[in-house]
Protein backbone atom coordinates (compact mmCIF):
# COMPACT_ATOMS: atom_id res chain seq x y z
CA UNK A 1 0.00 0.00 0.00
CA UNK A 2 2.88 2.36 -0.20
CA UNK A 3 1.39 5.08 -2.19
CA UNK A 4 4.01 7.61 -3.05
CA UNK A 5 5.70 5.45 -5.63
CA UNK A 6 9.46 5.52 -5.24
CA UNK A 7 10.64 2.22 -6.66
CA UNK A 8 10.40 0.73 -10.07
CA UNK A 9 8.44 -2.38 -11.00
CA UNK A 10 9.73 -5.44 -9.23
CA UNK A 11 11.09 -6.87 -12.43
CA UNK A 12 13.62 -4.05 -12.53
CA UNK A 13 14.94 -4.90 -9.10
CA UNK A 14 15.74 -2.56 -6.26
CA UNK A 15 18.09 -0.45 -8.37
CA UNK A 16 15.13 0.44 -10.53
CA UNK A 17 14.15 2.91 -7.81
CA UNK A 18 11.55 5.44 -8.80
CA UNK A 19 12.97 8.74 -7.71
CA UNK A 20 10.46 10.75 -5.79
CA UNK A 21 10.68 13.21 -8.60
CA UNK A 22 14.37 12.74 -9.17
CA UNK A 23 14.61 14.63 -5.95
CA UNK A 24 17.89 13.70 -4.33
CA UNK A 25 21.37 15.18 -4.24
CA UNK A 26 24.12 16.71 -2.21
CA UNK A 27 24.03 13.85 0.28
CA UNK A 28 27.10 13.36 2.39
CA UNK A 29 28.82 9.97 2.19
CA UNK A 30 29.05 8.23 5.54
CA UNK A 31 32.51 6.80 6.03
CA UNK A 32 31.42 3.90 8.19
CA UNK A 33 30.90 0.84 5.99
CA UNK A 34 27.27 -0.26 6.05
CA UNK A 35 27.97 -3.88 6.94
CA UNK A 36 30.05 -2.83 9.92
CA UNK A 37 27.50 -0.27 10.97
CA UNK A 38 24.63 -2.69 10.94
CA UNK A 39 26.64 -5.42 12.61
CA UNK A 40 27.37 -2.99 15.44
CA UNK A 41 23.74 -1.95 15.72
CA UNK A 42 21.97 -2.55 19.01
CA UNK A 43 19.76 -5.59 19.13
CA UNK A 44 16.71 -3.41 19.62
CA UNK A 45 14.47 -2.36 22.42
CA UNK A 46 10.98 -3.28 23.37
CA UNK A 47 8.62 -1.79 25.93
CA UNK A 48 5.38 -3.28 27.22
CA UNK A 49 3.11 -1.33 29.53
CA UNK A 50 1.64 -3.83 31.93
CA UNK A 51 0.84 -7.48 31.34
CA UNK A 52 -2.72 -6.85 30.24
CA UNK A 53 -1.68 -4.02 27.96
CA UNK A 54 0.71 -6.23 26.04
CA UNK A 55 -0.58 -7.22 22.55
CA UNK A 56 -2.37 -10.54 22.73
CA UNK A 57 0.35 -12.41 20.84
CA UNK A 58 3.25 -10.71 22.66
CA UNK A 59 5.32 -7.84 21.37
CA UNK A 60 6.57 -7.53 17.79
CA UNK A 61 10.28 -7.13 18.53
CA UNK A 62 11.25 -10.18 16.48
CA UNK A 63 9.27 -8.82 13.53
CA UNK A 64 11.10 -5.47 13.80
CA UNK A 65 14.45 -7.28 13.85
CA UNK A 66 13.51 -8.89 10.53
CA UNK A 67 13.74 -5.48 8.84
CA UNK A 68 17.45 -5.19 9.58
CA UNK A 69 18.45 -8.88 9.62
CA UNK A 70 19.24 -9.04 5.89
CA UNK A 71 20.58 -5.49 5.58
CA UNK A 72 17.61 -4.25 3.54
CA UNK A 73 16.69 -1.67 6.22
CA UNK A 74 18.84 0.29 8.64
CA UNK A 75 16.19 0.98 11.27
CA UNK A 76 12.62 0.12 12.24
CA UNK A 77 10.34 1.08 15.11
CA UNK A 78 6.66 0.84 15.95
CA UNK A 79 4.06 1.82 18.53
CA UNK A 80 0.73 0.18 19.33
CA UNK A 81 -2.20 1.96 21.01
CA UNK A 82 -5.37 0.49 22.47
CA UNK A 83 -8.25 2.71 23.59
CA UNK A 84 -6.00 5.74 23.49
CA UNK A 85 -3.20 4.19 25.57
CA UNK A 86 0.20 3.19 24.31
CA UNK A 87 0.47 -0.54 25.06
CA UNK A 88 3.72 -1.43 23.31
CA UNK A 89 6.56 0.05 21.34
CA UNK A 90 9.83 -1.30 20.06
CA UNK A 91 12.82 -0.42 17.93
CA UNK A 92 15.60 -2.16 16.03
CA UNK A 93 18.65 -1.08 14.07
CA UNK A 94 20.69 2.10 14.04
CA UNK A 95 19.47 5.68 13.77
CA UNK A 96 22.74 7.07 12.38
CA UNK A 97 25.27 4.78 10.70
CA UNK A 98 28.09 7.28 11.24
CA UNK A 99 27.69 7.42 15.02
CA UNK A 100 25.97 4.13 15.81
CA UNK A 101 23.24 6.04 17.63
CA UNK A 102 20.36 3.73 18.58
CA UNK A 103 16.86 4.23 17.26
CA UNK A 104 14.46 6.33 19.31
CA UNK A 105 10.89 5.03 18.93
CA UNK A 106 9.56 8.52 19.65
CA UNK A 107 11.45 10.07 16.73
CA UNK A 108 10.04 11.85 13.68
CA UNK A 109 9.99 10.41 10.16
CA UNK A 110 8.72 11.13 6.68
CA UNK A 111 5.29 9.54 6.23
CA UNK A 112 4.95 9.66 2.43
CA UNK A 113 1.47 8.69 1.35
CA UNK A 114 0.10 8.47 4.87
CA UNK A 115 -0.38 12.17 4.08
CA UNK A 116 -3.32 11.16 1.88
CA UNK A 117 -5.80 10.36 4.69
CA UNK A 118 -5.16 13.82 6.15
CA UNK A 119 -5.96 15.41 2.79
CA UNK A 120 -9.06 13.29 2.11
CA UNK A 121 -10.37 14.11 5.60
CA UNK A 122 -10.19 17.84 4.84
CA UNK A 123 -12.01 17.31 1.53
CA UNK A 124 -14.74 15.35 3.33
CA UNK A 125 -15.07 18.13 5.90
CA UNK A 126 -15.57 20.56 3.01
CA UNK A 127 -18.29 18.24 1.72
CA UNK A 128 -19.96 18.45 5.13
CA UNK A 129 -19.75 22.25 4.90
CA UNK A 130 -21.46 22.07 1.47
CA UNK A 131 -18.52 23.68 -0.26
CA UNK A 132 -18.51 20.85 -2.80
CA UNK A 133 -20.04 17.44 -3.46
CA UNK A 134 -18.16 14.21 -4.01
CA UNK A 135 -19.78 13.69 -7.39
CA UNK A 136 -19.05 17.21 -8.64
CA UNK A 137 -16.76 17.29 -11.69
CA UNK A 138 -13.20 18.48 -11.24
CA UNK A 139 -13.77 20.87 -14.15
CA UNK A 140 -16.17 22.91 -12.00
CA UNK A 141 -13.40 23.92 -9.61
CA UNK A 142 -10.22 23.59 -11.69
CA UNK A 143 -11.37 24.52 -15.20
CA UNK A 144 -9.11 23.57 -18.07
CA UNK A 145 -6.52 21.85 -15.89
CA UNK A 146 -7.40 18.20 -16.57
CA UNK A 147 -8.46 16.75 -19.94
CA UNK A 148 -11.97 15.28 -19.65
CA UNK A 149 -12.30 17.05 -16.29
CA UNK A 150 -16.05 17.23 -16.76
CA UNK A 151 -16.24 13.42 -16.45
CA UNK A 152 -13.82 13.10 -13.51
CA UNK A 153 -15.44 13.62 -10.11
CA UNK A 154 -13.95 14.52 -6.76
CA UNK A 155 -14.78 10.98 -5.65
CA UNK A 156 -12.78 9.58 -8.58
CA UNK A 157 -9.74 11.50 -7.33
CA UNK A 158 -10.03 10.34 -3.74
CA UNK A 159 -10.55 6.62 -4.50
CA UNK A 160 -8.14 6.43 -7.47
CA UNK A 161 -10.73 5.63 -10.11
CA UNK A 162 -10.09 8.75 -12.21
CA UNK A 163 -7.85 6.92 -14.66
CA UNK A 164 -5.35 9.80 -14.54
CA UNK A 165 -1.75 8.77 -15.11
CA UNK A 166 0.46 8.77 -12.02
CA UNK A 167 3.08 11.45 -12.67
CA UNK A 168 5.64 9.44 -10.67
CA UNK A 169 5.45 6.71 -13.31
CA UNK A 170 6.97 9.12 -15.83
CA UNK A 171 10.51 7.94 -16.78
CA UNK A 172 12.09 11.15 -15.50
CA UNK A 173 11.42 9.87 -11.99
CA UNK A 174 13.38 6.61 -12.29
CA UNK A 175 16.89 5.46 -11.68
CA UNK A 176 17.91 2.17 -13.23
CA UNK A 177 21.45 1.38 -12.05
CA UNK A 178 24.12 2.56 -9.64
CA UNK A 179 25.27 5.30 -12.01
CA UNK A 180 21.82 6.89 -12.15
CA UNK A 181 21.39 6.34 -8.40
CA UNK A 182 24.66 8.23 -7.93
CA UNK A 183 23.31 11.08 -10.07
CA UNK A 184 20.18 11.08 -7.96
CA UNK A 185 22.19 11.26 -4.74
CA UNK A 186 24.67 13.92 -5.86
CA UNK A 187 22.77 15.91 -8.47
CA UNK A 188 20.87 19.15 -8.06
CA UNK A 189 17.36 17.76 -8.38
CA UNK A 190 17.19 16.75 -4.74
CA UNK A 191 16.57 20.37 -3.83
CA UNK A 192 14.23 21.22 -6.71
CA UNK A 193 10.94 22.93 -5.98
CA UNK A 194 7.90 21.60 -7.83
CA UNK A 195 4.61 23.41 -8.15
CA UNK A 196 1.49 21.25 -8.12
CA UNK A 197 0.61 22.49 -11.62
CA UNK A 198 3.92 21.08 -12.87
CA UNK A 199 3.24 17.66 -11.39
CA UNK A 200 -0.28 17.54 -12.82
CA UNK A 201 1.08 18.58 -16.22
CA UNK A 202 3.43 15.57 -16.19
CA UNK A 203 0.52 13.26 -15.36
CA UNK A 204 -1.93 14.56 -17.96
CA UNK A 205 0.73 14.54 -20.68
CA UNK A 206 0.27 10.73 -20.67
CA UNK A 207 -2.84 8.90 -21.85
CA UNK A 208 -5.20 7.91 -19.02
CA UNK A 209 -5.23 4.32 -17.82
CA UNK A 210 -8.98 4.03 -18.44
CA UNK A 211 -12.12 6.13 -18.66
CA UNK A 212 -13.20 7.75 -15.37
CA UNK A 213 -14.86 5.26 -13.06
CA UNK A 214 -14.02 2.29 -15.28
CA UNK A 215 -11.10 0.84 -13.34
CA UNK A 216 -8.70 1.37 -10.44
CA UNK A 217 -5.09 2.52 -10.53
CA UNK A 218 -3.20 4.21 -7.75
CA UNK A 219 -2.18 7.66 -8.95
CA UNK A 220 -0.46 10.38 -6.96
CA UNK A 221 -1.77 12.87 -9.53
CA UNK A 222 -5.20 12.47 -7.92
CA UNK A 223 -4.03 13.81 -4.58
CA UNK A 224 -2.04 16.69 -6.01
CA UNK A 225 -5.36 17.73 -7.56
CA UNK A 226 -7.15 17.21 -4.23
CA UNK A 227 -4.69 19.62 -2.63
CA UNK A 228 -5.40 22.16 -5.37
CA UNK A 229 -9.15 21.75 -4.76
CA UNK A 230 -8.66 22.61 -1.08
CA UNK A 231 -6.84 25.81 -2.01
CA UNK A 232 -9.52 26.74 -4.54
CA UNK A 233 -12.34 26.26 -2.05
CA UNK A 234 -10.73 27.77 1.06
CA UNK A 235 -8.24 30.27 -0.33
CA UNK A 236 -5.55 28.58 1.78
CA UNK A 237 -3.01 25.85 1.12
CA UNK A 238 -3.89 22.24 1.83
CA UNK A 239 -1.10 22.24 4.45
CA UNK A 240 -2.62 25.12 6.39
CA UNK A 241 -6.09 23.56 6.26
CA UNK A 242 -4.80 20.18 7.48
CA UNK A 243 -3.01 21.96 10.31
CA UNK A 244 -6.05 24.07 11.24
CA UNK A 245 -8.63 21.30 11.01
CA UNK A 246 -6.69 18.23 12.20
CA UNK A 247 -3.21 18.84 13.57
CA UNK A 248 -3.97 21.61 16.06
CA UNK A 249 -7.33 20.27 17.35
CA UNK A 250 -5.79 16.83 17.96
CA UNK A 251 -2.57 18.31 19.42
CA UNK A 252 -0.40 16.44 16.93
CA UNK A 253 2.54 18.55 18.00
CA UNK A 254 5.17 16.60 16.07
CA UNK A 255 3.29 16.49 12.76
CA UNK A 256 4.27 18.95 10.03
CA UNK A 257 3.84 19.40 6.30
CA UNK A 258 7.10 21.18 5.44
CA UNK A 259 6.55 22.18 1.82
CA UNK A 260 10.02 22.80 0.41
CA UNK A 261 11.79 22.44 3.75
CA UNK A 262 14.45 19.76 3.40
CA UNK A 263 15.21 18.72 6.96
CA UNK A 264 13.53 16.69 9.70
CA UNK A 265 13.49 18.57 13.00
CA UNK A 266 14.03 16.86 16.34
CA UNK A 267 15.14 13.27 16.94
CA UNK A 268 14.89 11.15 13.80
CA UNK A 269 16.42 8.22 12.00
CA UNK A 270 18.53 8.78 8.89
CA UNK A 271 17.82 7.50 5.38
CA UNK A 272 20.53 5.97 3.20
CA UNK A 273 21.33 4.89 -0.34
CA UNK A 274 23.90 2.21 -1.10
CA UNK A 275 26.89 3.30 -3.20
CA UNK A 276 30.16 1.47 -3.83
CA UNK A 277 32.13 3.75 -1.51
CA UNK A 278 29.61 3.40 1.31
CA UNK A 279 26.16 4.53 2.38
CA UNK A 280 25.07 8.01 1.30
CA UNK A 281 22.93 9.91 3.77
CA UNK A 282 19.79 10.96 1.88
CA UNK A 283 17.80 12.18 4.87
CA UNK A 284 17.47 15.73 3.58
CA UNK A 285 15.39 16.31 0.45
CA UNK A 286 12.81 18.68 -0.98
CA UNK A 287 9.48 16.84 -0.93
CA UNK A 288 7.46 19.31 -2.97
CA UNK A 289 7.70 16.48 -5.50
CA UNK A 290 5.15 14.70 -3.30
CA UNK A 291 2.93 17.71 -2.49
CA UNK A 292 -0.48 16.62 -1.15
CA UNK A 293 0.32 13.04 -2.13
CA UNK A 294 3.07 12.62 0.48
CA UNK A 295 4.72 15.69 2.01
CA UNK A 296 4.18 14.94 5.71
CA UNK A 297 6.46 14.32 8.69
CA UNK A 298 5.13 12.81 11.93
CA UNK A 299 5.73 10.39 14.79
CA UNK A 300 4.25 7.01 15.61
CA UNK A 301 2.33 8.51 18.54
CA UNK A 302 0.83 11.30 16.44
CA UNK A 303 -0.19 8.95 13.63
CA UNK A 304 -1.87 6.59 16.07
CA UNK A 305 -3.81 9.49 17.61
CA UNK A 306 -4.88 10.61 14.14
CA UNK A 307 -6.08 7.11 13.24
CA UNK A 308 -8.02 6.82 16.51
CA UNK A 309 -9.71 10.18 15.93
CA UNK A 310 -10.52 9.52 12.27
CA UNK A 311 -11.95 6.03 12.69
CA UNK A 312 -13.43 6.88 16.07
CA UNK A 313 -15.69 9.45 14.40
CA UNK A 314 -14.12 12.59 15.88
CA UNK A 315 -13.19 14.26 12.58
CA UNK A 316 -16.16 13.49 10.30
CA UNK A 317 -19.93 13.40 10.56
CA UNK A 318 -21.57 9.94 10.12
CA UNK A 319 -22.49 10.65 6.48
CA UNK A 320 -18.92 11.54 5.51
CA UNK A 321 -17.55 8.73 7.70
CA UNK A 322 -19.61 6.30 5.64
CA UNK A 323 -18.22 7.78 2.43
CA UNK A 324 -14.67 7.47 3.78
CA UNK A 325 -15.15 3.71 4.10
CA UNK A 326 -17.10 3.12 0.89
CA UNK A 327 -14.54 1.04 -0.99
CA UNK A 328 -13.78 -0.05 -4.52
CA UNK A 329 -11.78 -3.17 -5.41
CA UNK A 330 -8.14 -2.71 -6.35
CA UNK A 331 -8.06 -5.82 -8.50
CA UNK A 332 -6.11 -8.10 -6.16
CA UNK A 333 -9.06 -9.60 -4.29
CA UNK A 334 -7.18 -8.90 -1.06
CA UNK A 335 -7.38 -5.12 -0.76
CA UNK A 336 -9.94 -2.36 -1.23
CA UNK A 337 -9.69 1.42 -1.33
CA UNK A 338 -12.00 4.01 0.16
CA UNK A 339 -11.54 7.79 0.13
CA UNK A 340 -7.89 8.12 1.09
CA UNK A 341 -7.86 4.97 3.21
CA UNK A 342 -7.32 1.33 2.36
CA UNK A 343 -8.88 -1.82 3.72
CA UNK A 344 -6.70 -4.91 4.01
CA UNK A 345 -6.66 -8.22 5.87
CA UNK A 346 -3.53 -9.17 7.81
CA UNK A 347 -4.98 -12.47 9.00
CA UNK A 348 -7.78 -11.42 11.37
CA UNK A 349 -10.31 -9.68 9.17
CA UNK A 350 -10.53 -6.23 7.59
CA UNK A 351 -8.34 -3.45 9.00
CA UNK A 352 -8.08 0.14 7.87
CA UNK A 353 -5.27 2.58 7.19
CA UNK A 354 -2.60 3.51 4.71
CA UNK A 355 1.09 3.16 4.09
CA UNK A 356 3.57 5.30 2.31
CA UNK A 357 7.12 6.40 1.90
CA UNK A 358 9.89 8.26 0.15
CA UNK A 359 13.39 7.12 -0.77
CA UNK A 360 14.89 5.70 2.41
CA UNK A 361 11.64 5.98 4.41
CA UNK A 362 8.68 3.67 4.90
CA UNK A 363 5.52 3.94 7.00
CA UNK A 364 2.51 1.81 7.87
CA UNK A 365 -0.56 3.05 9.78
CA UNK A 366 -3.35 0.51 10.24
CA UNK A 367 -5.95 -0.31 12.84
CA UNK A 368 -9.46 -1.41 13.60
CA UNK A 369 -12.53 0.12 11.97
CA UNK A 370 -13.70 1.62 15.27
CA UNK A 371 -10.38 3.37 15.95
CA UNK A 372 -9.81 1.50 19.20
CA UNK A 373 -6.55 -0.21 18.25
CA UNK A 374 -3.81 0.82 15.83
CA UNK A 375 -0.15 0.37 15.00
CA UNK A 376 2.18 2.93 13.44
CA UNK A 377 5.39 1.58 11.94
CA UNK A 378 8.39 3.45 10.55
CA UNK A 379 11.37 1.83 8.82
CA UNK A 380 14.29 2.93 6.69
CA UNK A 381 14.77 0.77 3.59
CA UNK A 382 18.42 0.87 2.51
CA UNK A 383 18.04 2.11 -1.06
CA UNK A 384 19.98 0.04 -3.57
CA UNK A 385 19.65 -3.28 -1.71
CA UNK A 386 17.27 -6.19 -2.30
CA UNK A 387 13.85 -5.20 -0.86
CA UNK A 388 12.18 -8.59 -1.31
CA UNK A 389 11.71 -9.30 2.39
CA UNK A 390 10.33 -5.91 3.39
CA UNK A 391 6.69 -6.51 2.45
CA UNK A 392 6.62 -9.70 4.52
CA UNK A 393 8.18 -7.89 7.48
CA UNK A 394 5.56 -5.12 7.22
CA UNK A 395 2.70 -7.64 7.15
CA UNK A 396 4.15 -9.57 10.08
CA UNK A 397 4.39 -6.45 12.26
CA UNK A 398 0.77 -5.58 11.45
CA UNK A 399 -0.40 -9.14 12.09
CA UNK A 400 1.44 -9.49 15.39
CA UNK A 401 0.31 -6.14 16.79
CA UNK A 402 -3.24 -6.00 15.45
CA UNK A 403 -4.19 -9.66 15.21
CA UNK A 404 -2.31 -10.90 18.26
CA UNK A 405 -0.17 -13.51 16.54
CA UNK A 406 2.08 -14.05 13.56
CA UNK A 407 0.13 -14.10 10.34
CA UNK A 408 -0.47 -17.53 8.80
CA UNK A 409 1.55 -18.17 5.64
CA UNK A 410 -1.52 -17.80 3.45
CA UNK A 411 -2.47 -14.51 5.10
CA UNK A 412 1.06 -13.16 4.58
CA UNK A 413 0.87 -14.01 0.89
CA UNK A 414 -2.59 -12.49 0.52
CA UNK A 415 -1.73 -9.32 2.44
CA UNK A 416 1.51 -8.91 0.49
CA UNK A 417 -0.45 -9.25 -2.75
CA UNK A 418 -2.85 -6.63 -1.42
CA UNK A 419 0.00 -4.25 -0.66
CA UNK A 420 1.34 -4.69 -4.18
CA UNK A 421 -2.07 -4.05 -5.72
CA UNK A 422 -2.49 -0.90 -3.69
CA UNK A 423 0.73 0.38 -5.18
CA UNK A 424 -0.89 0.35 -8.59
CA UNK A 425 -1.05 -1.78 -11.69
CA UNK A 426 2.62 -1.08 -12.44
CA UNK A 427 3.50 -3.43 -9.58
CA UNK A 428 5.95 -0.89 -8.21
CA UNK A 429 7.63 -1.82 -4.94
CA UNK A 430 6.59 1.68 -4.20
CA UNK A 431 6.82 4.21 -1.55
CA UNK A 432 7.35 2.19 1.50
Image (spheres, rainbow, N blue to C red):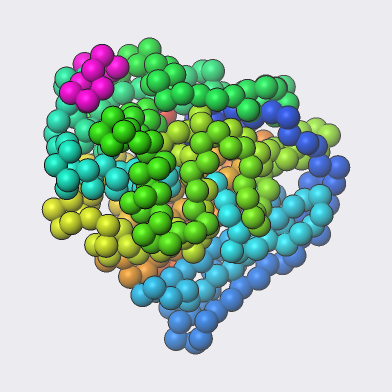
Can residue 177 be seen in this snapshot? no
Most common SS among magenta residues:
loop
Which residue range is magenta in the image? 138-148
Using the image, determine if residue 134 lies above or below residue 315: above
Question: As drawn, which residue projects farthest toward the right?
Answer: 31
State the residue at coordinates (20%, 21%). 139
Q: Which image quarter is the N terminus in?
A: top left
Q: Position of residue 272 (x, y in %)?
A: 69, 42
Question: As drawn, which residue projects farthest toward the front?
Answer: 235
Could you say which is closer to the camera, residue 92 or residue 10?
92
Q: Is residue 106 magenta-colored?
A: no
Left or right, residue 107 beside residue 125: right
Could you say which is closer to the camera, residue 211 or residue 101?
101
Q: Position of residue 402 (x, y in %)?
A: 40, 67
State the residue at coordinates (31%, 65%). 371
Question: As drawn, which residue projects farthest toward the bottom?
Answer: 51
Q: Position of residue 337 (x, y in %)?
A: 28, 44
Q: Quadrant of residue 193?
A: top right
Amino acid sequence: MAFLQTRAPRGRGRLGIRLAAAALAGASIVTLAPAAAMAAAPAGTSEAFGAEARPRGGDAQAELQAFIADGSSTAAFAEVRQNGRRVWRGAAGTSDLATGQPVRPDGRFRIGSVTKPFVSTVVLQLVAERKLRLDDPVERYLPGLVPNGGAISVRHLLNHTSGLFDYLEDPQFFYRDEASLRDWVHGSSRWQDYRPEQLVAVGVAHPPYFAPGQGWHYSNTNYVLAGMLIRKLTGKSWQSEVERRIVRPLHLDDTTFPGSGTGVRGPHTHAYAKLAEGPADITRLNTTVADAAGNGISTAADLNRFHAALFGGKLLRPAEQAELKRTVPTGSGHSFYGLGVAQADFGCGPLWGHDGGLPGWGTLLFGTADGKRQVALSYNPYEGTDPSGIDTAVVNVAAKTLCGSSAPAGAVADATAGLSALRGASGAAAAR
